[in-house]
Image (cartoon, grey):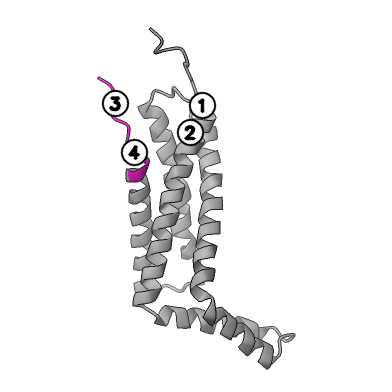
């Protein structure tokens, strides 16, 4: 009996939902955004993609190549990226106070830099306010796709490969 292969969609949704649950838990439990725990969801993302590729290899009896394993992991990463963008847009729309907290943190960081004048700081905050959503979506897109590509490379590299290209010719 052949083992059923878990789809990339299922794996991507599971990883994305776990990341959202962790992020919501940390946000509403009052954990500071500055704490080192903010990296927990990214660690789950990378680990999830690597494990998903390894599981895929096992399900197909390692009958694949590096490129196929990488593609499987990157499809999962792309879905997780879409999920996290949707989550972030919805979250900021429902809880706009978190946008204000981010702007306040940016203002404090600028105030600590003595080379930035008050006028330039206000212009910077105004520009950040205007392009906040676009910047957030672009940042998430770039970060998750790069991180997903790295996780896919790692997963594809460590998963066994025993491709048998002529196995089904008879």
In terms of secondary structure, where does tag 3 sit? loop
Residue 29 visible somewhere in the drawing: no
Identify the residue at the far left of this view: 1
Image coords of residue 50 (percent x, y) = 46, 41
Image coords of residue 58 (percent x, y) = 39, 28
Tell whether 119 sits left or right of 41. Answer: right
- CA neighbours of label 3 inside 10 A, class few (<14), some (14 to 19), many (20+): few
- Observer-side mark, 4 or 3, equals 4
Nearer-N-terminus badge (2/4): 4
In terms of secondary structure, where does tag 2 sit? helix
Rounded to the nearest angstrom, the CA distance separating label 1 from label 3 is 19 Å
Rounded to the nearest angstrom, the CA distance separating label 2 from label 3 is 17 Å
Q: Which residue is mark 1?
A: 65
Asked if the residue at tag 3 contacts the one at tag 2, i.e. Cβ–Cβ closer than 8 Å, the answer is no
Identify the residue at the far right of this view: 115
Q: Which residue is mark 3?
A: 3
Which residue does the image show at 51% across and 75% down from the upper left?
Answer: 132
In terms of secondary structure, where does tag 4 sit? loop
Q: Quadrant of the C terminus?
A: top left
Tell whether 77 sits left or right of 16. Answer: right
Q: As displayed, is residue 123 above or below residue 157? A: below
- CA neighbours of label 4 inside 10 A, class few (<14), some (14 to 19), many (20+): few
Rounded to the nearest angstrom, the CA distance separating label 2 from label 4 is 13 Å
Q: Which residue is mark 4?
A: 7
Rounded to the nearest angstrom, the CA distance separating label 4 from label 1 is 18 Å
Identify the residue at the far bottom of this view: 118
Asked if the residue at tag 1 contacts the one at tag 2, i.e. Cβ–Cβ closer than 8 Å, the answer is yes
Q: Which residue is mark 2?
A: 69
Which residue does the image show at 42% across and 12% down from the upper left?
Answer: 167
């Amino acid at each position: 009996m052949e083992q059923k292969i878990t789809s990339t969609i299922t794996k991507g949704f599971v990883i994305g939902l776990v990341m959202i649950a962790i992020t919501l838990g940390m946000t509403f439990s009052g954990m500071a955004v500055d704490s080192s725990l903010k990296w927990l969801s990214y660690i789950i993302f990378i680990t999830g993609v690597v494990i998903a590729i390894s599981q895929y290899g096992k399900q197909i009896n390692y009958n694949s190549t590096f490129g196929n394993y990488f593609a499987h992991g990157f499809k999962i990463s792309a879905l997780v990226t879409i999920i996290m963008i949707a989550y972030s847009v919805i979250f900021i729309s429902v809880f706009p106070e978190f946008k204000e907290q981010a702007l306040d943190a940016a203002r404090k960081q600028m105030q600590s830099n003595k080379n930035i004048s008050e006028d330039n700081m206000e212009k910077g905050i105004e520009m950040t306010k205007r392009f906040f959503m676009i910047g957030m979506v672009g940042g998430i897109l770039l970060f998750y796709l790069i991180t997903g590509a790295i996780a896919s490379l790692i997963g594809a590299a460590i998963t066994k490969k025993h491709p048998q290209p002529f196995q089904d010719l008879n």
